Image (cartoon, grey):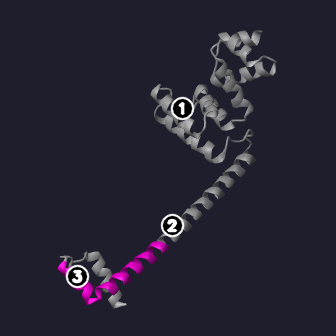
Amino acid sequence: MSLVENLARRQHHSLDLLRDIKRLKDSGYSEREIATKTQLSIKYVHGVIRLLESHEHRLLRAVESGKIPVSVAVDIAEADDVGVQAVLRQAYESKVLRGGRLMAAKRLVEARKSFGKGRGTSDKRTRKNLSVETLLRTYQNDVEKKKILLRKAGATRSEMLFLTHSLKTLFSDENFVTLLRAEGLSNIPKTIADRLTRIDGL
């Protein structure tokens, strides 16, 4: 009873609110009872409990450090990928998140999408392992992107060589050249002319 009264009356920090709602839940109160006693909506109480029970450690750390309000964290946890963008837009429009806090929230959302909810433990060894894993994953992604770019560059080069040689063959045909002159297309772009000249020099 004292816990419920303190929760309802005192001015509390966001993380305290999260923990107190979880304590009430663990003490046997239903979500509806918690909502009634604390004058919070059932949806909000359900979201807070879900945030804790689903181990949203990344969101919890953001709330604890004051980067995002608890209400926004709960909405993010409840939303899908499309809904998260709507949550951020609504937070911006309602002036809950602006400037640096909005950018921090966007980075948090991207990190959560790419690397998951985060880990509950915060010991140095775990953070070090996570950093190494993240670095390796980032390196592998960069290598794969460069391989794709190289393959595309190679394919483009092959296509350009094919087109250049095809043009060279066509321009060596007097009938084709006569047709171009008749259509007023005897001049060709300098870039293409230079390529054809380079082929002649090879």
Locate the C terminus and report the quarter of the image it occupies. bottom left
Circle 3 sits on which residue?
179
Question: Helix, strand, or loop for circle 1?
Answer: helix
Res 149 label: 2
As drawn, 4 above or below 89: above
Image location (x, y in percent) of residue 10:
65, 12
Question: Helix, strand, or loop for circle 3?
Answer: helix
Can you see residue 101? no
Which kind of residue does numbered mark 3 sit on?
A: Leu
Magenta residues (range) = 154-182
Can you see residue 81? yes
Q: Residues within 10 Å of mark 2 (few under 14, many from 20)?
A: few
Please tell me which residue lies in front, 161 or 71: 161
Res 87 label: 1
Please tell me which residue lies in front, 89 or 101: 89
As drawn, 88 above or below 10: below
Which kind of residue does numbered mark 1 sit on?
A: Val
Question: Helix, strand, or loop for circle 2?
Answer: helix
Residue at position x 38%, y 78% in the image: 163
As drawn, 88 above or below 179: above
